Image (cartoon, rainbow, N blue to C red):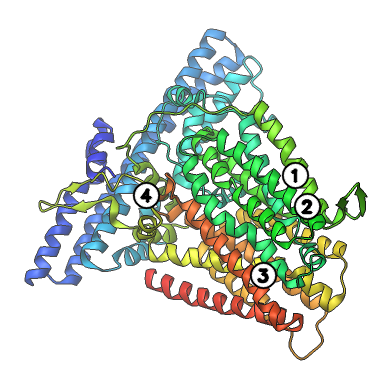
Amino acid sequence: MVAFGKKLKERSIEEWQDYYINYKLMKKKVKQYGQQIEVGSLDRRHCLKDFSRMLDHQIEKIALFMLEQQGLLSSRLQKLREWHDVLQDEPDISEISNLREAYRSVGQDLLKLLLFIDMNAIGIRKILKKFDKRFGYRFTNYYVKTRADHPYSQLQQVFRHVGLGAVVGAISRNLHELQNNEGSYLSIYDQPVVPLQDPVVDSIKNAVDRLTHSTNFLNFMAQHALIMQDEDLLIPHDEQADQEEGRYHFMSLLLNLANTFLYMVNTYIIVPTADDYSMSLGAAATVCGVVIGAMAVAQLFSSVYFSAWSNKSYFKPLIFSSIVLFFGNLLYALAYDFNSLALLLIGRLFCGFGSARAVNRRYISDCVPLKIRMQASAGFVSASALGMACGPALAGLLQTDFKIKSVTFNQDTLPGWVMAVAWLLYLVWLAISFREPAREPEEIDTSQESKSADQDGSMEKGLKKPLLLASEETEHDEEDDGDGSEESSDDSRKPANSFVAAYKLLTPSVKVQLLIYFMLKYAMEILLSESSVVTTYYFGWSMSSVSIFLFCLGLTVLPVNLVVGSYISNMFEDRQILLASEIMVCIGILLSFHVVIPYTVPQYVISGFIMFVSAEVLEGVNLSLLSRVMSSRLSRGTYNGGLLSTEAGTIARVIADATITLAGFLGQSMLLNVTLLPSLVICVGSIVATCFTYNSLY
């Protein structure tokens, strides 16, 4: 990774050089403090006080210059407003064009100011991290806590860029009036759904999004997909369009989302009938755990080779995925007539080997333009959630029993037949409509600093939390040499090349978040996979009843994420939601146990909904936080952050399904409590790890 000091020098706006953070001076002071403390000539408390005062002065210099530039922009906009009013009375096409260019000129200067803010925000975060690294002291914790909410602190001026929203709004609104309504001057508020197509406004919006990382629903869902951005803050619109030409194709994106949806349907369509299918082949009902989990076992391997394959192609792995899934479902359906449990398991393994979610995620990250990437990422999550709900619902509709010659079509085999037909039709659609995007030449030494900038920008949302978490990021991105200068190595720029290398890039907080992800996936898999066996044993539910129950659970995914992303995340810190959700999952697990009193439908349904909804809240917040604090080196390459989280969740599902089958040897009367016990232990362990880790960080 390029050293920040060098990048600051290269990207600084020349006429504003004196107003940037003096990163070089502060870095030298940090080194000097360390030397003085070692020889005993400086007291640690004096060092902290002196460094705090110096950083306060630097932030004050930045904030005051920001206000000065903001005032100049506001003054220019006021003059343009007067010009605009004159033209409103006497429209002139040439003058309107000139006025539009004048607004764009202000927009370009606003972009320069946003870049200035971004570079200084990175510099503040990095110098705090360097201080903590040098002294092994959580100075960042003290500094942010004492300044974030203080009425006289200018820290929020830098990280919340107060007042710039009005400038952004003025430019956007006036350009909308001039561009789309020449001569009529209709207000933008009269046509709120019409997007403004202007290069400057698009660039400003991208820059502001980078800086704010607002917690609206769309962005929350996009982060849930763990698709991290790697674009530069100020890529000219025309240049960006040229780079993206030939790569993005709407129908190809739609095919990727359809693949995601169908795969999730394929995963959950067998859940209501897996126990009945197992018994029809002479196995115990609890063997459904192995049947369901076989797909997850294969996915452990398919995620890796599909992730690697997507480095070279998107079309070929999708074709391979569709063919393998077609044959997997065909084998699953034919196992009934062959009376072969082995064939049933092989079919499910084939389905798992066809999991192309890594390709779907990678296509969005690499080929979808920045301006719609957030929507595409949210679409990826929504397609997964919709597939999860539609799978059991579709199984509930397949209530028939007939034969064509010697081939049986019933509630057990129809999920396989239906999905085989679906994948065959998808394969035809894919072959006709998908367009392989053009590949750019690989750049070995491409800087990933913009990834770090994405993480730095997240300081705005909940100023304390993201800054502190960012300070825990691994120190691979910058090191001091003997002269106090920074050097960068080729290794620090490259993505991880193995699971071991990727694991070494994980900070303690990220490891805890992956543990939380493992826990919630384990608990959800236990609930879903054994639902048919448990409800049949205790309540005598039919397959249709199980399907309705699972369908209702799946329907909660999008509403829950809507509430969390739009409201709860704006009211509480992520770590608070994280801990509260873990506790609620734990409560749901405790309520699910069958103790002395008779086990009732309300107890099972209520506890199941508490567990599932809390796990959904936990997953959304956990992945949203992971997308902001995970090392930038894990945002690309085969062994990326998305793959790590996928593998953690898949391993959890495999272990959960294996637990169900093993517990079945103790009898169905013991199944519920025996499978819930590991869930409870893992959940309590994750709560303890969360409290311990975040207490040490904060």
Mark 1 and mark 2 in contact? Answer it, CB < 8 Å: yes
Residue marked by disc 2:
333
Q: What secondary structure is found at the residue carrying circle 2?
A: helix
Q: Position of residue 410 (x, y in %)?
A: 87, 55
Left or right placement of residue 519 versus residue 588 in this view: left
Q: Residues within 10 Å of mark 4 (few under 14, many from 20)?
A: few
Q: Position of residue 361 (x, y in %)?
A: 55, 44
Label 3 amino acid? Ile
Left or right placement of residue 167 versus residue 697 in this view: right
Residue at position x 69%, y 60% in the image: 342
Residue marked by disc 3:
526
Q: What secondary structure is found at the residue carrying circle 3?
A: helix
In space, the residues marked 1 and 2 are separated at their CA atoms by 9 Å
Mark 1 and mark 4 in contact? Answer it, CB < 8 Å: no
Q: Is residue 688 visible?
A: yes
In space, the residues marked 3 and 2 are separated at their CA atoms by 25 Å
N-terminal-most mark, 4 or 2: 2
Residue that extends furthest to the bottom in the rendered view of this protein:
596
Residue marked by disc 1:
420
Residue marked by disc 4:
497
Mark 4 and mark 2 in contact? Answer it, CB < 8 Å: no
Q: Quadrant of the C terminus?
A: bottom left
